[in-house]
Image (cartoon, rainbow, N blue to C red):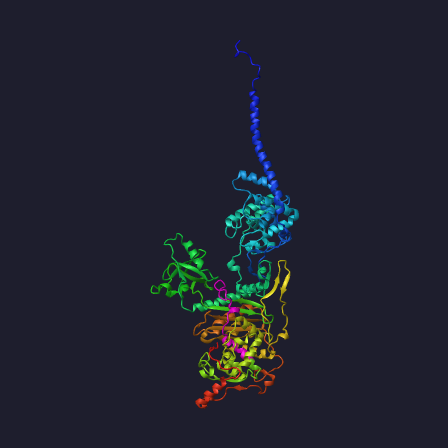
Amino acid sequence: MSEQGTPSNTPRPDRGSAGTRKVLRTLGWIVGLPLAAALSMLVLLGIALAMAYPNLPEINSLVDYRPKLPMRVISSDGVVLGEYGDERRSYLPIDQIPKVMQEAVLAIEDSRFYEHGGIDFKGIMRAAVENFRDSRSQGASTITMQVARNFYLPTEKTFTRKIYEILLSLKIESQLSKRKILEVYMNQIYLGQRAYGFAAASEIYFGKPIKDITVAEAAMLAGLPKAPSAYNPIRNRKRATIRQRYILERMVENGFITEAQRDEALAQELSYPSPRSSEVHAEYAVEAARQLIFAQYGDAAYTRGLTVELSINASEQMQAYRALRRGLMNYEQRKAYRGPSAFVELPATDTGLDTRIAEALEDHPDYDDLRAAVVTSVSARKVGAMLQNGETISVGGDGLRLAARALLDQTPPQQRIRRGAVIRVMKSGARGEWLIVNQPEVEGAFVSMDPRSGQIRAMVGGFDYARSKFNHVTQAWRQPGSSFKPFVYSAALEKGFSPTTVVNDAPLFFDAGTTGSQPWEPKNYDGQFDGPMSIRRALAKSKNMVSIRILKAIGPSYAQQWVTRFGFEAEKHPAYLTMALGAGSVTPMSMADAYAVFANSGVRVNPVLITRITDSRGQVIAQTPPRTAPDERMRVIPERNAFLMNTLLQEITRSGTAAKAQATLKRPDLYGKTGTTNDAQDAWFTGFNPALVAVVWIGYDTPRSLGERETGGGLALPVWIDYMGYALRNVPVVEYTAPDGVVQSGNDWVYAENAGGGGVRSLGMDDVASKPAAEERKGILDLFRDDSAGGGGGGASAPQ
């Protein structure tokens, strides 16, 4: 038999067995490689963790968590006036955060928070499954991990950062209680609108303390941590509402609320406060306080969570703000229309029109109710325009009265209202119609204070803080005009003058040789000389010649020193006869301080703006105790002097240049003095009630005439009346009672020693008209000369 036919004794391969081995080998690789990779990763992770753990930061900052808290400034009645600092926070212990707010956060951010140890492995698996089923990524970060990330880690999403996040979470859980971790999270998480923490967010989004929050509001706020901008309910109402509904469902699933509570929450219509209507305009007072606090605490003022309480009353502040703006706008309405502020090129069609206007008006911001608008259409009887917010308005009828000439074709192009013109508009108070108005060039100031305590009740430093941050109340040094005369009269009372003293209102003239500068022939505002009159009548009519004669008689140097009792600086009131007409320099604040001496019966108190400062825990760290009674140690003029001056100042508001005050407010306990400087460059009214002093100033930053017929009585007094009518609405009428040392004589009050003909009975009563001209001139020049004062010239001449 051939070899090929011979049976072989070698066993044949088992093809089935070989195939099995091959499959096993393949499965081994399939399973082994990932397993080996996983084991390698675990080894590497272990090594990484072992190396990283010692480098973890200490978490003392969480154990004793002290966030950067802004400085909050509030009014005396608890209204927030302003905040300083990059972050707006209101740190609350966890026990003071409502349970519903905590549960809303847990429902959406970490429903197993109280069950895991910092890393929620079940949550990670659930998120992995959800990510496999849905392309939208599901997060698995616990609240502890978010705290670790937000406090200590950079924002980049890297593998290394994730390792540190896990390790830090474990470390935080080992050292802090669950409630402390949740407290830190709920106070430091960013929620948009510069708000950090849910307490601050509740105030900002809903205008209410978090203790009053509803289920619906809590669910809305709980949606913010994921994406504060995307889910901002003010800017993205629809998107935020969708997320709110989802969170409410999650709260039901977790047993935090019932279905009935969910339905009630879904039915609630949320409202958000309007910044335009809720804001209290106290920017100048807040900035003044900020400067004082910064001088004391430096940069720490913006991070310690200080609450600075001001003496400002919020409602009175807004009344003062509106009153001054009305006064300034009424003045501007009497002026000719100055034309548009600017011109912009607009597209020929409506396509892109609103965008172009919005961009153009970025350079022309609104000043509260004084709005900027771009003209879109013009006809002889109607002007169409668009505001910054895209609202279209129509101006016609009386609204075009001021700008009527600007609609004419013959008007110069730069003054003509045409398509693309940037104009200023506002609504009329009575009928709510739009008016075209001037943007004010004139400025003003208002300040009021309690003369008994010195507490400032209202401060408005200008027309609008957004336009100019220069505080005219404290920084504008201006001539006071005739509003300074009462201080000269007060000095005269100590030199034997009385309200009954008769002084001649007759012409005066001083040549250049006498004044040392230029000839001076002062005038009365009305151009009339009324001859002999009592001091009472002279001050009521604001007679300049009488004031000059009185100052000459008592001596300018004596008067200069006397006015320092009221807080004035002597060097700002040179000892010249022009002091009688208010030619020195004052601020509205210094005038309020000075008139408060009269109102407080001769006792001077320092102005107070900040009444209390507390830290982030509510502990008082500084406080100005309220004064309950006059401190005789602060007396600067005799009580009887103040009483006589108050009777003179009351006469001004009864029958003098400010008679409109008592006639309008229908109460006798009003006292004050008008003031208008030379060429009507400054208009003043400074007045008071025993409970309140208020000062109004109106003028241009670069001094120029307000107009021939503009006076303190016509410009400043109406603003004062507007405010005082509101501030005194619940204040009973109280007039001053005569103190010891004054008696009635000839139907008027005088010092007791001057009764029966004592003191100065008359002044300047010589019949100068019957003397030769040279002798008359010599007598007048002698009146001007004063060895202690020297010459003086210039100065104010208008008394109103």
Instruction: Identify the residue shown where x is 60% and y is 70%.
Output: 453
Q: Can the viewer see residue 722 in this picture? A: no
Lateral position of residue 421 relative to residue 87, left or right: left
Instruction: Judge by depth and name the residue closer to the eye, 89 or 204.
Output: 89
Q: Nearer the viewer, residue 647 or 165?
A: 165
Where is 24 relative to 608, above or below? above
Question: Does the magenta segment cover residue 642?
Answer: no
Please identify the residue farthest to the front as the structure is shown: 3
Query: Is 534 situated left or right of 181 in this image?
Result: left
Give the number of callouts: 0
Q: Which residue extends farthest left?
A: 410
Residue 136, horizontal then vertical, whole percent: 52, 42
Q: Position of residue 319 (x, y in %)?
A: 53, 66
Q: In the image, is 216 to the left or to the right of 518?
A: right
- Whether residue 31 is visible, yes or no, is yes
- In this rendering, the answer to whether 147 lies above or below 36 is below
Q: Quadrant of residue 597?
A: bottom right
Q: Which residues are magenta?
A: 462-490
Q: Is residue 464 above or below residue 496?
A: above
- Of residue 439 and residue 380, the one placed in the foreground of this image is 439
Viewer-side residue, 96 vs 742 = 96
791 lies above or below 281: below
Give coordinates of residue 227: x percent, y percent.
Answer: 53, 48
Instruction: Give how far across and how far down residue 590 sits, in percent.
Output: 54, 72
Whether residue 474 appears in magenta in the rendering, the answer is yes
The part of the image, by quadrant, that contains residue 689 is bottom right
